[in-house]
Amino acid sequence: MEKEKEKKEPKKETKKKVTKSETKKVVEHKFCGECGNKLGKNDKFCENCGAPTHIEIKEEKKSPKAVEKEEKKEEVETKKEKEVTKVVEKEEKVVEPIPKKKSNKGLIITIIVLGSLLGIGVIVLLLCLILGVFSPKPKTNWGELYAAKIQEAVDYHKKYPKAEMYGVVQGINKYNIKIVDIGEKYPVMISEAKKDDKTSRMIYYIDNDKVGYVSSEANDDIKLFYNTEVKDYIWYRETKSGITSYYDPIGKIVDQEKSSSISNNKCYNCTTQANNENIKADKYTSYTFYEKENLSDTDIEKYISYKDQVLIEVEKKVPTKTIDIDKPKVNEVIANLEESYKEKENLITNKDEKNVEKVTKEIDEKVEEYNKKQEELALNSSNFQSKVGEHLKWFSAAYSGSYYGFNHVYKYIDVTGKVKVPGTPSDYMVYEVSGAKSKEDMKNTVLKYVEQSVFDNLNRRHYKTMFNDLYDYNGKVYLVEGGIGDGPYIKPEEARFVSYANGEAKVQLFQKDPFEGSTTATITVTIRYINGEYKITSYN
């Protein structure tokens, strides 16, 4: 009955504590003798408590009855254990014991070591990037030389921050760098920076594998032009000062710095223009242009100057990189400029060539039109009276003055005793200047035909009071004077044509004696075509 009761109500104790003396039984039944944990077939130690699964015990000799009794007891207990195990496995399906956590110390150490190595690697990488170890470096000979020169300037600036040497200017940290092909063995490197509204520029060049430089600080610029005389593309330094502009080839600037004796220059609209015919222009020729000169500057010449005829600007900019003195990446900057650098032949595109061809054609057409206009405006012995006769008439009148000059232009009518001009002496002779609207109109008429400077000179030298005896009264002009007799005169219709060249004409006027008619003076007048009209610019 007790056995049946045990079957119906089994104890919920799932594990039996086994003593060390029962270790052999423990091994056979696969339970730990210390904690009762279920063991594996080959376990030598309990995974739960770490106790050995077998302990050798010296067995005492027992009587046969004792042995038999012990075996029966063992058999009963084994049977009971099996029944209990079945019930527990059925109800709980035998929950596996939680194995003892293995130590992660080794893993943690490994992770720490790897992390440290990774961190060091990142730091090294960053340092390499900062120091430029992995940055591109110059590959050409000129690239390496220019990079070394700039690095030298950077190092010098750091050591002597207030010094202005080696291409570094005090107060400027950032420099724009570009490489330009001037048709020599090596290209030049140009460094530019703005200071006080001026361009501080360094032109670096290579001579015998050594870098030299030319410095300048002015309102100038570096531009590419097509030279119609040389028929080639040339880089020039353009400098302007008032009405004058200068163009110096970069190649010439560099060669002069190398102590070369290149000195050929061409000047347009200046006193040395006559010598230009003997100069054959080349890529080292410098040019000087005077934009406003008292030559025959017709309306056409206003937009087709000598400079436009010789130099055609090419809208071409080469790549530029910036070097910061405080954070220099010299090798990287020069290497990048190396990659983008193009020799002149590869820099000029078909579009540039077509544009030059178009502009050259337009210039040729304008020059041809200008030359035709010059022919029409040119003075000669047969046409000068029809073109400048009025100028000669008014010059003659101003030259001889109000007494003996204007009476050959206006008709003087004697109105003495008939007209009394207020404020004038009553015993003076009075003449009406017929055809004159006003004294001011007479002055303006003279100025219309005679250049201002010449008129002032005439007035100053001959008659400072040229218009002082003329009066406006009742809408007419009167000359009031003590008396007018015969005096020297000039007949402009008797003028003689002398010469015409480069838009400048020479004409002679003759002053005559009123009684004998002989020539008492010869006046040579210079006439130019300026701003759309003829003007008398000088006389002697």
Image (cartoon, grey):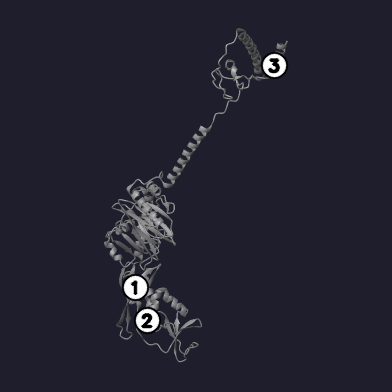
Circle 3 residues within 10 Å: few <14, some 14–19, many ≥20? some
Q: Quadrant of residue 486?
A: bottom left
Q: Amino acid at mark 1?
A: Thr
- The earlier-in-sequence mark between 1 and 3 is 3
Residue bearing mark 3: 10
- The earlier-in-sequence mark between 2 and 3 is 3
Residue bearing mark 1: 526
Residue at disc 2, secondary structure: helix
Q: Amino acid at mark 2?
A: Arg
Residue at disc 3, secondary structure: loop
- The earlier-in-sequence mark between 1 and 2 is 2
Q: Position of residue 374 (x, y in %)?
A: 35, 64
Q: Position of residue 212 (x, y in %)?
A: 32, 56
| Front disc: 1 or 2 | 2
Residue 461 is tagged as 2
Front-most of residues 457 and 94: 94
Residue at disc 1, secondary structure: strand
Q: Amino acid at mark 3?
A: Pro
